[in-house]
Image (spheres, coloured by chain):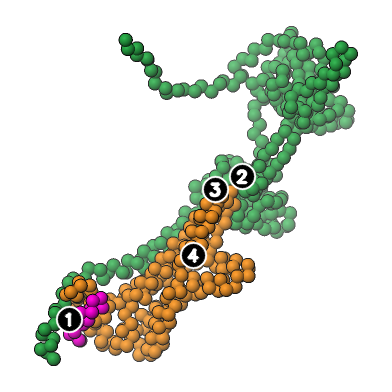
Chain colours: A green, B orange
Amino acid sequence: MSEAIHHMPKAKIQKDALSWFFWTLPVAAAGLCAWFILQDFVFAGPTITIYFQDAQGLQEQNSMLRYRGIKIGDIESLKLAGDKKMVEAKVKLSHSAADVARQGSLFWIVRPQLRLGQVSGLQTIVSGSYIAVQPASGARTNSFVGVAEPPVVVPPGIEITLLANNLDSLETQSGIFYRGVKVGEVTGVRLDQNARFVVVDALIQQAYAPLVRSDSQFWNAGGINAHLGLFTGLQISAESAATLVSGGISFATPEKLGPAATNGSIFFINEKADPKWQSWGPLIPMGQTMPDAPKIKTSMPKISPQITE
Amino acid sequence: MDKVVACQTCGLVQEVDHVPKGAVVKCSRCNFQIFHRRVGSRTRTMAFTVAAGILYFPSNLYPIVTAEYQGQFTQTTIFQGIRALWGHGQYFICSLVFCTSMLTPAMKILGLFFITLTLDWKRFQKTRAWIYKMIRIVDPWNMLEVFLLAICVSMVEMGEVATVNPGRGVFSFAAVVVLTLFATFTFDPRLLWDTPAERKVYE
């Protein structure tokens, strides 16, 4: 037997370098789990609660919180608040957007909206509604009450009051036009205290404020003006396509300029324009209130053409 | 200790001298490793099993796939997928997916852990052998391909309209499958009938 073994080849013996290596695997696995947990709990943003009157269009787990077009949070749950008058939406913010959770931030739900003269939120027809936010810089808080309408950024301008016998086709967001240029819009309509007039609140943009003088004449420019004349035939005119559907107010200022209108100036809206008004052509210095055209600096290299002879 | 060992790769029977600690034996003909018992089999199997056991949790808790379609966001874990299959009345596919992707890996991990942990006990010797046999039987049914295929198909099909991304779960799941595969591979079944004394010699 020992002789047989003697003729056998001998195996080589080498050093084993890998025996410790296998225990790095459980360590790596635990490290991976720790990283996941760290991401979920430590690097996660806070969870905030937003109360809405109506959460129509939102879906649990599916809808998101967006700001400037990107997702900054997930809706974790939607349920009725204790008194059943509100919907309680729990939103998990992403880490980078944790700063949104501050007092004064406004949250609203973006849904598709179709109005005369205005369409918004069309993308939400396919993507579903989402919550939008306008961040503020108050103290940190985790509880908010959502607003029903998106906040309107009020541009600087002067607020004037217009009185009319009849509202006709005017409504909020109808335009105020000067020579066909939109210079402001209606911010609200209501009846006056004695229901004698319709009170139309309007905002004239700051840049166009000098156009409105104390003796400016306003008239309703909505709808179609049709005039049937013996020699002129049928004349149909409308201020603009937009006023056709959503109504509008035009005004003119006489050549002899009165004092500029201020906040709270009151004017009367005439039913029809006097042809005389339309011929007024005052020179109104717009001053420096006109917004400057953005200056575009070009970094184009100056190329001086070289003419070879 | 036997002095004669056959190479498992080329079959050459050869003589092995005394092996010092921390050394390996190579076949004199094909240079592949030869052994009485697979080197460090028990600890390596245990290492693989522990790693797989740790990763089994994220593989089931995290979504395997996340899809974003026009701002709509969905993510699905393995279990949610199984429930969806059940809800659609696909009972056979549902049970198949449940067995291959949730039950088998769990049983394998538990079984290997039990074997390696209780190897020195006198009791359960037959049970250990039976468990090992079962693991070898169900091994081919550990189908990672099913899920990979499902994800690939959805990526190709929905690539135009939706963004489909593999989630954290699928990476963990893939790691579990590979780790359990290695765990069974490194386990030397001869350890099942070695006595503790013999095992010490072969270690």
Which circle marks residue B147 in the picture?
4
- The answer as to whether the residues below labels 2 and 3 share one chain is yes
Q: Residues within 10 Å of mark 1 (few under 14, many from 20)?
A: many
Distance from disc 4 to disc 2, alpha carbons, whole Å, reads 36 Å
Seen at 67% across and 12% down, the residue is A284
Residue A72 badge:
3
**Which chain does the residue under circle 3 lie in?**
A
Vertical order, A173 against B127 (above or below): above
Whether labels 2 and 1 belong to a single chain: the reply is: no
> Label 4: few (<14), some or many (≥20) within 10 Å?
some
For the residue carrying disc 2, how many other residues have a C-alpha within 10 Å: few (<14), some (14-19), or many (20+)? many
* Quarter of the image where one finds residue B28: bottom left
Which residue is at 79% across, 30% downward?
A170
The residues tagged by marks 1 and 4 sit, at their Cα atoms, a distance apart of 45 Å
Chain containing mark 1 = B
Between the C-alphas of marks 2 and 1, the distance is 76 Å
Disc ID at residue A132: 2
- The answer to whether one can see residue A305 in this image is yes
Secondary structure beneath label 2: strand
The amino acid sitting under disc 1 is Gln
Q: From the top left corner, tell me how far across and down residue A88 is, in percent.
A: 66, 55
Say if the magenta span includes residue A182. no
- Residue at mark 1 shares a chain with residue at mark 4: yes
Q: Is residue B8 magenta?
A: yes
Task: Tell me where residue A227 appears, x and y as whole percent.
Answer: 85, 18
Q: Amino acid at mark 4?
A: Phe
The magenta stretch is B1-16
Q: Main secondary structure of the magenta part?
A: loop
Look at mark 1 in the image and give the residue it sits on.
B14
1 vs 3, front mark: 1
Q: Quadrant of residue B137?
A: bottom left
